[in-house]
Image (tube, helix red, strand yellow):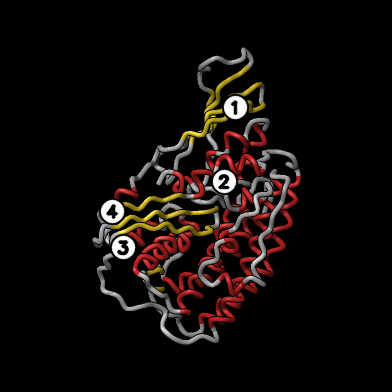
């Protein structure tokens, strides 16, 4: 099981270019076929089979989505924005909604806040399972797929979607929870926990074979703007759920734990990902318990066309792949004058220039598999 659009390795030897050591070769890692949903090319310089230089080359499927935002109202923007990180779509929608609500001075109902938190953590689990199940040599694809599928069934029962959920609206969420959904979700989480050892143990064992490989330390993470699991594995202890609390996270401080490592290598990144799955399952259960006790609406009734007051704001969220940022500039119209995205994958891919040198060709697959990114989140 490979995350859609995440990565596909196609290696072709190209002509040497520039001032190279006589023993160096230039090898192209990608791009793969344009009919797929994402393209990434990494230009590698090799000394024998060891990488001595790496240059990520992005932009093959640039969709101009930030310009598309400028001619669409905010309801349409929310439908588009989850298509860059489609494995964590709820978090992508959330950033836009938070920015608009801040400029409107809108207070979101408590049930909507807790539902948003629950779905963000649910999709954090399914996103991480996609990457963990695809780790080379781990033989964890079947249980990871089964666990992810079990949660996607409940996600679809609530939102009608399995990836592009489009469940967030300005002022809350689209609709209320169907009868019996909390019980079904609780059962699904229990099923995932029963499957979890069959994912975690083989993935950790496979990753342990690459100790000291593909190191991304704290300094390089900061220099390249890397965030999320890849940065925390190298000692950069930063998580906006804790450090810039939003949604219901301030009330979940006793449940929210932020796993951090210092080695910054392949096993460290996998350990952070697996621990985050366990934490997110705890958060899903805590949100479910709280929602059972809450009553009231799940959104604020607004006109179909929302006009945002003139001004600007910046909202940031902790998505599964790292920090996403949303700079919204309005001139008082129904469409944003400017909506600039800062997506985590772009910086994570940029850091390959620091991570890949020193790796052998056979180590490229596990190194790339340990760094969470989606090409659609890079070429947006």
SS category of the residue bearing label 4: loop
Q: Are marks 3 and 1 in contact (CB under 8 Å)?
A: no
Mark 4 nearby-residue class (10 Å; few <14, some 14–19, many ≥20) = some
Q: Secondary structure at mark 3?
A: helix
In front: 241, or 27?
241
Disc 2 + disc 4, Cβ < 8 Å? no
Name which residue lies at 51% across and 75% down: 114
Q: How many marks?
A: 4
Element carrying mark 1: strand
Front label number (1 vs 2) = 2
- Give the class, few, some or many, for how many residues have Cα within 10 Å of label 3's Cα (few <14, many ≥20): many
Q: Earlier in the sequence, mark 4 or mark 3?
A: 3
Q: Mark 4 touching mark 1, by CB under 8 A? A: no
Classify mark 1: residues with Cα within 10 Å, few (<14), some (14-19) or many (20+).
Answer: many
- Crowding at mark 2 (Cα within 10 Å: few <14, some 14-19, many 20+): many
Kindly identify the residue that appears in the image at 38 percent across and 68 percent down: 101
Residue 53, which numbered label? 1
Residue in the image at 55% along x and 53% along y: 322
Q: Position of residue 367 (x, y in %)?
A: 64, 41
- In the picture of the structure, the residue carrying the numbered disc 4 is 337
Numbered label attached to residue 226: 2
Q: Quadrant of residue 241?
A: bottom right
Name the residue tied to disc 3: 74
Residue 127 location in percent, x, y? 55, 58
- The Cα–Cα distance between marks 4 and 3, rounded to whole angstroms, is 11 Å
Tags 4 and 3 touching, CB below 8 Å: no
Disc 1 from disc 2: Cα separation:
19 Å
Q: Earlier in the sequence, mark 3 or mark 2?
A: 3
Q: Seen in the image, is 35 located left or right of residue 88?
A: left
**Closer to the eye: label 3 or 1:** 3
SS category of the residue bearing label 2? loop
């Amino acid at each position: 099981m490979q995350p859609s659009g995440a990565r596909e390795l196609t290696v072709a030897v190209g002509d040497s270019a520039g001032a190279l050591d006589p023993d160096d070769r230039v090898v192209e890692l990608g791009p793969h076929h344009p009919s797929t949903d994402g393209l990434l090319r990494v230009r590698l310089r090799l000394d024998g089979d060891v990488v001595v230089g790496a240059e990520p080359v992005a932009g093959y499927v640039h969709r101009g989505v930030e310009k598309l935002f400028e001619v669409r109202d905010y309801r349409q923007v929310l439908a588009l924005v989850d298509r860059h990180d489609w494995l964590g779509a709820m978090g992508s929608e959330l950033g836009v909604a938070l920015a608009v609500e801040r400029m409107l001075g809108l207070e979101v109902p408590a049930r909507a806040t807790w539902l948003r938190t629950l779905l963000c953590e649910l999709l954090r689990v399914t996103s991480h399972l996609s990457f963990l199940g695809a780790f080379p040599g781990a033989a964890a694809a079947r249980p990871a797929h089964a666990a992810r599928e079990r949660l996607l069934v409940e996600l679809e029962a609530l939102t009608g979607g399995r990836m592009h959920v489009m469940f967030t609206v300005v002022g809350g969420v689209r609709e209320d929870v169907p009868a019996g959904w909390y019980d079904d979700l609780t059962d699904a989480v229990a099923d995932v926990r029963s499957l979890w050892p069959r994912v975690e143990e083989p993935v950790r064992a496979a990753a342990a074979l690459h100790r000291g490989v593909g190191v991304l330390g704290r300094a390089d993470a900061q220099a390249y703007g890397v965030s999320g699991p890849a940065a925390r594995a190298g000692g950069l202890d930063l998580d906006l759920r804790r450090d810039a609390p939003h949604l219901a996270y301030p009330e979940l401080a006793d449940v929210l734990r932020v796993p951090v490592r210092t080695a910054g290598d392949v096993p460290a990144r996998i350990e952070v990902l697996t621990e985050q799955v366990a934490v997110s399952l705890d958060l899903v259960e805590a949100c479910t318990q709280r929602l059972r006790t809450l009553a009231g609406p799940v959104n604020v009734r607004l006109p179909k066309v929302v006009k945002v007051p003139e001004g600007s704001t910046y909202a940031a969220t902790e998505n599964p792949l790292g920090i996403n940022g949303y700079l919204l500039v309005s001139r008082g119209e129904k469409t944003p004058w400017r909506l600039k995205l800062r997506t985590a994958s772009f910086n994570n891919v940029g850091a390959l220039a620091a991570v890949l040198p020193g790796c052998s060709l056979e180590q490229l697959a596990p190194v790339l598999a340990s760094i969470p990114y989606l090409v659609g989140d890079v070429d947006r």
